[in-house]
Amino acid sequence: MAKLLQAPPKFLLPEWHIANKNQYNSAESQRSRSERLVAESQRLVDEIEKTTQRTQRDVNKKIEQRLDEIKFWKKELGDKLDQLVKETEVLFTFKTRLEKALESCQEPLYIAQKCQMFREQRVGIDLVHDEAELELIKEVEVLQGVISLLQRTLEETSEQLRLNRAAKYNLEKDLKDKFVALTIEDFCSSLTNNNPDICYADNVIRIEPNSVSIDDWVDFSNVNVEKADKQRNNTLALEALIDRILSQTASDLRKQFETVNLTFQSRIKETKDAKDKLTMHLVKVMDEITSQEKNIEVLNKAILDKEGPAKVAQTRLESRSHRPNVELCRDPAQYRLIKELHEITSNVERLKATLAQAEAELKGLSRRQLALQEEIQVKENTLYIDEVLCLQMRKSIQHHNF
């Protein structure tokens, strides 16, 4: 047993001193390295803290700049939206005016065409292609032209309103996105290192595949603004055009309406004058008929009155033809009786010829009377059509500025 337990080896004194010295050197070296690491670590901590703070300040500044950019474009979009909405409301007003103007053209067109139809019922010589008819035809053409123009302008207005709605939709959608972005950027701007809302998030260091460049972002809003400006300018131009069209067409219609009325009044005056002259001639003809009838009575009486003297002359000649012998002489009385009978016969023939002429004239006067009466009825029919049916109906038309 004693043999098995061997005593540990003993070192020499120099070895002991060397071993201690080595321990001193190792400890000093380890401590020195640790001191350097502590100092280096502090410098690194200070440097990273400064870098982190500087970077965070830069990020905060970038977010603030981004906020300013979003606010700028949000204001631009909002201003353009307000302008477009305001001008669209004005255009709606013009559209309503166009619709009312179009509706108000229907009655004058109907009345003008009705007047044309009524005037086709004129008869005889009064069925004339006069100035009133020419102006009526022109009025119908003007009204149809105005209706066509207003319809086209109304279609253009509806299309412009559609374009305005599209531009308005794009502005509103862009504004909505800007509002959301502004809310997010405001939230990001408000975050601090001690904010309770901060946390770690997975897979945040990435570029979204659907993201756009800053230039694309600016261009997108700029295009929306330019489109809105374009449609607003188009709306302003269309409003000015509509205003001119409504003003001009109202003036044209009113002018033509007054022209037609003046031609009607002139034609009515001419017809009345003609009717008055016909009536005057009718009175004269009727007076002449009365005079001629009396003349015929006088002629008939004159012819009848000659029967007595003719009978007396013939009786005398008959009686004197029975004188006896030498008493049957051709004395002055005989010659005078024969001459008297010839005169009576000749005068009766003249009276009968004059009577025939008078009776022919009476028939002619009667025919003229009927012709005048018929012509007066024609004029009365024309006056009823022009003055009562047409002119009175036209007075119901109210021409206002569209």
Image: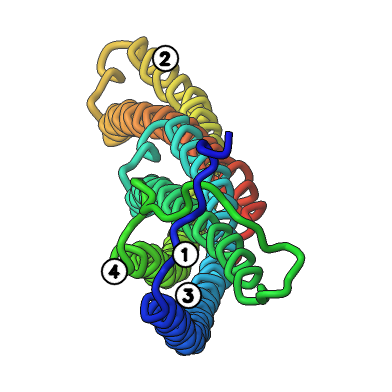
- Compared with residue 390, is residue 207 higher up or lower down, i.e. above or below? below
**Closer to the observer: label 4 or label 3?**
4
Q: Residue at x 46, y 32 (%)?
A: 117
Please name the residue that numbered disc 4 is placed on: 215
The image quadrant of residue 367 is: top left
The location of residue 237, given as percent across then percent down, is 37, 71
Closer to the N terminus: mark 3 or mark 2? 3
Residue 203 seen in this snapshot? yes
Please name the residue that numbered disc 1 is placed on: 246
Q: Amino acid at mark 1?
A: Leu
Q: Is 195 situated left or right of 346 in this image?
A: right
Q: CA distance from mark 3 to mark 2?
A: 145 Å
The location of residue 345, given as percent across then percent down, is 33, 26
SS label for mark 2: helix
Marks 4 and 3 in Cβ contact (< 8 Å):
no
Please name the residue that numbered disc 2 is placed on: 319
Residue 73's disc number: 3
Q: Residue at x 51, y 38 (%)?
A: 3
SS label for mark 1: helix
Q: CA distance from mark 4 to mark 2?
A: 150 Å
Looking at the rendered structure, the number of numbered marks drawn on it comes to 4
Q: Amino acid at mark 2?
A: Ser
